[in-house]
């Protein structure tokens, strides 16, 4: 049985929230910022380490995470698209923990991500020896998503606006789902944020 200590969590927080007009990572929900919420959930999960990949507004985000036991890693190419942040996170993880079993990618704008969800992804990976464990919502698979280390070479080859979704689709036969009914709720616009606050 593999050790549960073998999975790192990488939080992708480099985007500039162009549609929202301000850093969505720093929006407040239930008395904490979205980035702090997902980072605290990741730290409390059965992960070995938590890495936050920053880009736009890196200083503000690093300051928000100041007191938390996580690594903020700056992606200088963040403007080129999501792939560069995935690559930055995987490279950091491989360098800091060479023998790691896999990583989970999470984003900062899914306000309903929980410790239990992170643990469910890890447990499912350990149980079924699954290569990819993805959150399932609204008839699709998405983040948070776990990739075993055998996918690191494929992740490192992603470029531009490609994201984890490309590999989830390409290796569909190796994907195990974990239900995350509220996974489709993310914050891209002011209207999304107002709706979230109105429902809380």
Image: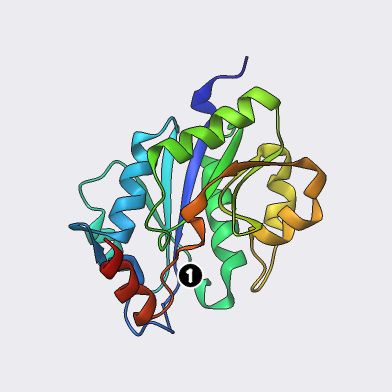
Q: Position of residue 153 (x, y in %)?
A: 73, 48
How was the colour assigned to the protein in this rendering?
rainbow
Residue 123 lies in quadrant:
top right
Q: Is residue 58 above or below residue 7?
A: below
Q: Answer yes or no: is residue 97 visible.
A: no
Q: Front-most of 193 and 121?
A: 193
> Would you identify the image quadrant in which residue 53 lies?
bottom left
Say if 195 sits above or below 101 in the image: below
Residue 58, compared with residue 80, is above or below; it is above
* Residue 120 seen in the current view: yes
Q: Position of residue 105 (x, y in %)?
A: 53, 50
User: Is residue 148 found left or right of 117 in the rendered image?
Assistant: right
- Residue at coordinates 80% horizontally, 49% vertically from top-left? 171
- Quick one: quadrant of the C terminus? bottom left
Q: Which residue in the protein does label 1 denote?
A: 76
Q: Residue at 51%, 61% (x, y): give it.
A: 184
Residue at far top of view? 1
Say which of 133 and 147 sits in front: 133
Residue at x 21%, y 57% (from the top left corner):
30
Residue 173: which quarter of the image?
Answer: top right
């Amino acid at each position: 049985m593999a050790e549960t200590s073998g999975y790192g969590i990488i939080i992708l927080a480099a985007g500039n929230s162009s549609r929202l007009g301000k850093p969505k990572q720093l929006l407040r929900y239930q008395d904490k910022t979205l980035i702090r919420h997902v980072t605290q959930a990741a730290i409390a999960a059965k992960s070995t380490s938590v890495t936050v990949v920053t880009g736009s507004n890196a200083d503000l985000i690093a300051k928000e995470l100041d007191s938390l036991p996580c690594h903020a890693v700056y992606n200088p190419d963040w403007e080129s698209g999501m792939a560069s942040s995935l690559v930055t996170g995987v490279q950091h993880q491989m360098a800091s923990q060479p023998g790691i079993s896999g990583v989970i990618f999470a984003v900062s704008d899914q306000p309903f991500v929980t410790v239990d969800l992170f643990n469910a992804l890890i447990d499912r990976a350990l149980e079924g020896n699954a290569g990819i464990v993805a959150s399932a919502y609204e008839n699709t698979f998405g983040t948070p998503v776990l990739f075993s280390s055998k996918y690191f070479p494929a992740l490192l080859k992603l470029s531009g606006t490609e994201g984890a979704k490309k590999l989830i689709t390409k290796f569909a036969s190796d994907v195990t789902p974990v239900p995350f009914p509220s996974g489709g709720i993310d914050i891209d616009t002011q209207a999304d944020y107002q709706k979230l606050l109105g429902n809380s």
